[in-house]
Image (tube, rainbow, N blue to C red):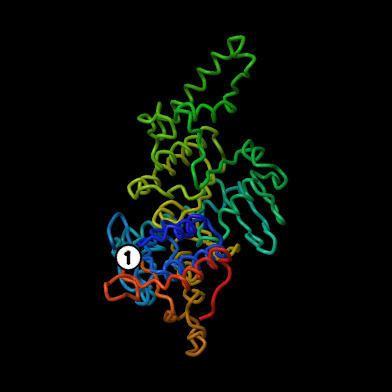
Amino acid sequence: MLSLAQAFLSRPRLLMIDELSLGLAPAVVERLLDIVRAIHANGSTVILVEQSVNVALQLAQKAFFLEKGEVRFSGLTSELLQRDDVLRAVYLHGTAKGLGTEDAANSIREAARAKKRLAGLAQAPVVLQARGLTKRYGGVSAVQGVDLELHQGEVVGLMGPNGAGKTTLFDLLSGHTPANGGGVQLLGRDVTALPAFARARLGLGRSFQDARLFPGLTVAETIGVALADRVGAPGALHALLNLYDVKYGEAAIAQAVEEVIELLNLGPFRDKFTAELSTGSRRLVELAVMVAERPKVLMLDEPSAGIAQRETEALGPVLRQVQRHLDCSILIIEHDMPLMRSLADRLIAMDTGRVVVGGEPDQVLSDPRVVASYLGTTTLPGLEDGDASARNGSARPVRRAPRARKEAATSGSVRQTAARNGAGRPVRDTPRKDAEIKRSVRNPGTRREP
């Protein structure tokens, strides 16, 4: 919100917004949308990069869908709303799967193998379990009565639109946030009352959306810090006296560091400071830190966020390799659906703090409730009231046409504003529209009725 206020003060002719809704609750996103609309109504052209199709289609009149550096689809949002194949392909499957160009025989073989593997995993012991987990912030329920089971050797993907409660659930499971209700069991032990560091010592590893590393340490030193507790490094007094166990501990740590570096192919970055690394390399170092602690349950929060497509494609095999090396179970939050389909044994879909559906990846991704939560088929704000499905007796959600707005809609590409003067420049009704924007920035929750 602060960055949007700064944009308002600078009066840009072109405003470029990268991931407006990333990590924000729906109520906050709605307030930001009002501010963006007000800035656009003042004559600014807006380009929005956004993963949430709901947010993009509320603002944009035209959209471009990109994958692997190429424009896969483009068109008016009013037309794309009617294209289930396009929306599913981009947001839920990947273009090859979504448009049916994937090898059918390979798909059948993969499905059979996955079903057989899933049947075996269902008989394995439960290593992480949540029962009725609930978290409230004032009058808002971020997580509502969530039940979850993760079996030994299993990879479970947690998916849902921004604000669905995924990261809050991670915070509850890892002990970073206390729950208002329900309980958590780790490796058969009730850890509901234990803090995060105690759960980590019991075998729970967790990453964050932004890699939290020591900027002043090299990659090898960072991994060494993670290994010190496991190897049993002596304290400062022993180091001061230069006792034999200090040399033994340092040699053991150095050997373990080299093993982790070799496992994740971090050799070229061994002596580089973590602050110098790219986002993708920092993600690998964060993963190396967790591997060093040898957790039995690994929780990954959007490991592919902010990294290049090529690095994302290489991430799936790396995570499988880590799982085999540690013989651990993985719970992963991820928006990259092709990565999730290739990696996860099961998917659990969340929306508004609740579990919507769980099961095999293809089953979950084709579930109408999941499609509705991602694509907003019945609840997309800014559309006409009235349910067409109620009128025609169909149970299938019917998309509604966008409502005409007094304010011009923004665009997913550089486009001309609705009102222009004779010179081809945007008309600025400065006193009235500046006042509207100031009111929106001061009180974003207030909306003018059309």
Residue 340 placement (x, y as % from top left): 44, 54
- Residue 195 coordinates in the image, percent (x, y): 68, 42
Q: Residue at x 66, y 63 (%)?
A: 140
Task: Identify the residue at horizontal 38%, vertical 33% (top origin).
Answer: 265
Foreground of the two, 446 or 140 = 446
Residue at the spot of label 1: 413
Residue at screen point 62% across, 49% down: 173
- Up the image or down, 238 lies above or below 408; here it is above
Measured as percent of width and height from the top left, residue 5 is found at: 49, 58
Nearest the viewer among 167 and 245 is 167
Amino acid carrying label 1: it is Ser
Q: Nearer the viewer, residue 257 or 77?
A: 77
Residue 56, relative to residue 315: is it above or below? below
- Front residue (pair 158, 430): 430
Q: What kind of element bears circle 1?
A: loop
Residue 43 against residue 217 in the figure, above or below = below
Q: How many marks?
A: 1
Residue 148 location (% of width, % of height): 61, 56
Is disc 1 surrounded by few (<14), some (14 to 19) or many (20+) residues within 10 Å?
Answer: some
Q: Quadrant of residue 277?
A: top left
Q: Write down the quadrant of residue 78 in the picture.
A: bottom left
